Structure formats: structure tokens, C-alpha cells
Amino acid sequence: MDDDGPQDVVSELEGRGLGGWGLLQIAGCTGLAAYSVWALVLMPGFRRVPLKLQVPYMPASAKQVENVMTLLRGRTGKMADLGSGDGRIVLEAARRGFCPAVGYELNPWLVRLSNFYAWRSGYHRRVTYLREDLWKVKLQDCDNVSIFLAPSVLTLLEKKMLAELPSHARVVTGRFPLPTWVPDDIIGEGVDRAWAYDIRTVRQAAKTKEMGTEV
């Protein structure tokens, strides 16, 4: 007896109702697939991070990547993506001439995926993906920083960047703005919106606020 081909199976399903048992089987398979993605791709990056500092992985869209690059247009030097996920922002930065282009990502599976994408595109020699906790990354040599992280960690990250980044650095955030910094530029709408912050401006505002408080 010949095996049924995919089209035969689809036709058979279309011709009859799935029923309660069929729906239960589909739900079970979907749940198992979701758990597999969590266990293999997402969970390894969370084990070493306190709960309040955990950031779920959500890849940037093509429009979000383009908005980041627009806000960094005309700039050069090191580009660092904190929590780089599958590496697409770092890869695009390398294409735009940023050197070095570095992604910092704690999840080992996402680091491997990033390296695969870089190899497939022919840019594997021009990008670097490091498995590092972003809270331990030293930012003193970063000229440009991109961030697509959850709001729960942004306040702490503000303090780290303000203390470590050079004055000429520019920070670009996607999806969520930094909670207390005033952006120098904004682009996009809705989930594609991105905000740019110049560290020199942020430090000057902090200094002015401090002087006003003292008075």
C-alpha cells in the first residue's frame, strides 16, 4: 500500500471535522513545540539571571532594524547591541560599515543562530557575537549602542550606560524609550518607534538637574 502524500492528508482533513480528540491532539503538539522552543532556545539564557533582570527574546522586525540604522546614520566606530538575540541588528550594522560590530547575548542558542546567519550572509568575519551577561559588559569603548529590552531593566541600564559610555556615544532603543532620559531624536510609529539619546546631552541634563536640586 502506498503511503499517503501530504496533499492526500490535507484533503482528508478538509473533508471531515477534527472532533474533540483531534483538536486535543493538535493542542498537545502545539504545547509540546512551544515548550521545546522555551527549553532549548530561551531557558538557557535565563538560568544565570535574576528574575527581575530577565528579558524575553523577541526578534526585531525589518522596519525596526531600519529605524535603528537611520538614527545612527553618519556615525562610525564600534556598534554594540545589548541583548542581541539572533544578531540581525549587528549584522545590518556591519553592512552599513560599523566596525567593530558586536552583539552581547547570554543565550548560547541565540549566539549560535547569530553566527549561522552571519556565515550565511558572508559577514562572519566582520561581526562578533559574545555570550556575555549585558550587566557585566564594559561599555567604555562603545561609540554606538542599540537596545531592544523590556522596560523592567531600562532604569538600571540607564545608570550603567551613564557611568560607562563615552560622551560622544549615542544610544538607540527600540519598542520602549528609556524611562528618565529625554531623546534627541525619535523615528517611527507604534511598535516600530525608536529613540536616540546622545550621552553628552544626557550628562548635561543630569548635571543641570543636580545643580538645580542643590539650589
Image: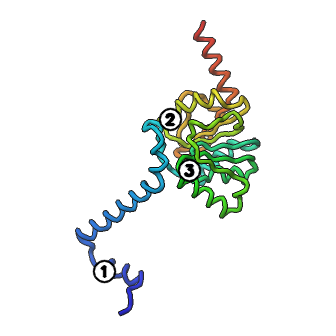
| Residue 17 rendering spot, x and y as whole percentages | 26, 74
Relative to residue 41, is residue 202 drawn left or right? Answer: right
The residue closer to the viewer here, 63 or 105, is: 105
Nearer the viewer's eye, disc 1 or disc 2? 2
Q: Earlier in the sequence, mark 3 or mark 1?
A: 1
Instruction: Please give the residue where the numbered disc 1 appears in the rendered image.
Output: 15
| Residue 19 rendering spot, x and y as whole percentages | 24, 71
| Residue 64 rendering spot, x and y as whole percentages | 59, 49
Q: Is residue 193 visible?
A: no
Q: Quadrant of residue 35?
A: bottom left
Q: The disc labelled 1 sits on which kind of residue?
A: Gly
Say which residue appears at 38% left-offset and 87% top-offset.
Answer: 3
Q: Is residue 112 above or below residue 68?
A: below
Q: The disc labelled 2 sits on which kind of residue?
A: Val
Task: Locate the C terminus by quadrant.
Answer: top right
How would you rate the neighbour count of disc 3 (Cα within 10 Å): few for under 14, some for 14-19, many for 20 or more? many
Instruction: Please give the residue where the numbered disc 3 appears in the rendered image.
Output: 85
Q: Is residue 62 above or below residue 75?
A: below
Label 3's element? loop
Q: Is residue 59 above or below residue 133?
A: below
Looking at this rendering, what residue extends furthest in the bottom direction?
1
Q: Is residue 12 above or below residue 201?
A: below
Label 1's element? loop
In space, the residues marked 1 and 2 are separated at their CA atoms by 51 Å
Looking at this rendering, what residue extends furthest in the front direction?
48
Say which residue appears at 59% left-offset and 41% top-offset.
Answer: 147
Instruction: Please give the residue where the numbered disc 2 appears in the rendered image.
Output: 153
In space, the residues marked 3 and 2 are separated at their CA atoms by 16 Å
Say which residue appears at 62% left-offset and 44% top-offset.
Answer: 81
Q: Quadrant of residue 183?
A: top right
The residue closer to the viewer here, 183 or 105, is: 105
How would you rate the neighbour count of disc 2 (Cα within 10 Å): few for under 14, some for 14-19, many for 20 or more? some
